[in-house]
Image (cartoon, rainbow, N blue to C red):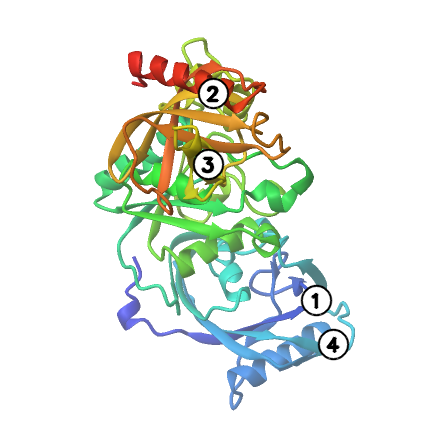
Amino acid sequence: MTDWEHWIPKEKATLLFVVRDGKVLLIRKKRGLGAGKINAPGGRIEAGETPLEAAIRETREELGVEALGAVHHGDLHFQFIDGYSLSCSVFVASDCIGTPTETAEAVPLWFPLNAIPFDEMWADDRHWVPGMLDGVHFRGWFTFDGDRMLEHRVEWDSPCKNDRDVVLAIGVFDGVHLGHQAVIKRAISDAAGRNAEAAVLTFDPHPDKVLSPDSAPRLLSEPEHKIALIEKLHPATVVTLPFDDEWAALSPETFLARLRIHFFPNLREIVIGEGWRFGVRGSGSAATIRALGIEAVEVPIVRDIDGHGISSTRIRQAVENGHLDEAARCLGHPFELRGKVIHGQQIGRTLGFPTANLDVQSEQFPPNGVYVATAQFDDEAHPCLVNVGTRPSVEGSHERNVEAYILGISRDLYGKTLTLAFQRFLRPEIRFPSLDALREQIARDVEMLECAPAK
């Protein structure tokens, strides 16, 4: 719409943001362009002034304070349909001398960095202020008809050079159940329609372990297992975000700005599950995404044939109660435990049934007992028996262990990663009066496995 290549501003101005103790100093302008709106202090550059000198002067005149440590962070270019045009140099100061006071020009307002009132500001602000306050230099071009923004473009001085358009699926995706798969598949489908790259963003640790650690859920799939399940759906990229208190405290706008600046500069569409929220106190939604000019798609909750919604919480409860068929229906595949083979006490070997002891990082186990399962490793799949429990006939510890006897496998598996896909419950874990009695029971279990192996 605007011919920016040949564009020349009629006026030049400045904006200055004072950031201190996690808050930013803004103003509500009383008069002039943007009167009534919230913005940063600033105004026109007078003859003979540098942009920095003008920014400091305007802040002094509007609020009665002297900005300290002001640094240039970006440049704005505005074209209005009525013919007015303006370029603006943006500065960030680390502190100020004096107490901001109301003047004839403006009313001072301090806001937490994660609670900036973008709905009361110019429409362009939500596109560049979060990233700028996050410390990234930028350039922005905007066309307005009065208060209405008609077009916008923001470029960041970002280390990320991926120039492909991206459709992004975002979620925790614990277990990668059918609902999660629907979100990821929608992103892949939409990306194909846009000739874009399909990407998946997930989190580690689970956000609830940061936000409410005492009530955080047990994980169905540890991070590497989750990524392996996601990759089976064949997105182009999977990114795991290290979630911590800093990320948890970000406003929705800053969260999305970081994604654009550091990971996906050409983020065109975000696909989420129905009702998914993000940002500090869950204040961000699909509407927030759309307000930033990114298309947002909410995938409805996937339901079973009885109309019940599929969720990670439901699957955890099903696994906890031993309802593995229900868990498998919700997951779209058998419930799995995954871990590396570690050295054990080799009791199974002395009994004639060598087992692979697993260091399992997942946290949600089925009830103690013996299960028929399939062991997957090195692109192979073998029937196996899995014991989940405390091995009362051997040591009777309180720690739950997972070990598998894999049918027809006698080679060394130490250090290999095994995925155990649970098929059915065979019997409870019990304490045998002797190792001979335990050996006889294992032999019967193996005979049953050989007659009716896992599918």
Q: Crowding near pointer 4: few (<14 within 10 Å), some, many (20+)?
A: some
Badge 4 amino acid? Gly
Residue 99 seen in this snapshot? yes
Of discs 3 and 4, which sits in the foreground? 3
The residues bearing labels 2 and 1 have C-alpha atoms spaced at a distance of 57 Å
Identify residue for label 2: 370
Residue 64 image label: 4
In this view of the protein, which residue sits in the foreground, 392 or 265? 392
Of discs 1 and 3, which sits in the foreground? 3
Which is nearer the N-term, disc 4 or disc 1?
A: 1
In the image, residue 211 sits, relative to residue 405, either above or below, namely: below
Identify residue for label 1: 21
Q: Crowding near pointer 2: few (<14 within 10 Å), some, many (20+)?
A: many
Residue at figure coordinates x 39%, y 18% from the top left? 443
In this view of the protein, which residue sits in the foreground, 251 or 311? 311
Q: Residue 45, percent across and down? A: 53, 80
In the image, residue 392 sits, relative to residue 194, either above or below, namely: above
Of discs 3 and 2, which sits in the foreground? 2
Q: Quadrant of residue 303?
A: top left
Badge 1 amino acid? Asp
The residues bearing labels 4 and 1 have C-alpha atoms spaced at a distance of 20 Å
Residue 299 seen in this snapshot? no
Residue at figure coordinates x 41%, y 60% from the top left? 262
Identify residue for label 3: 221
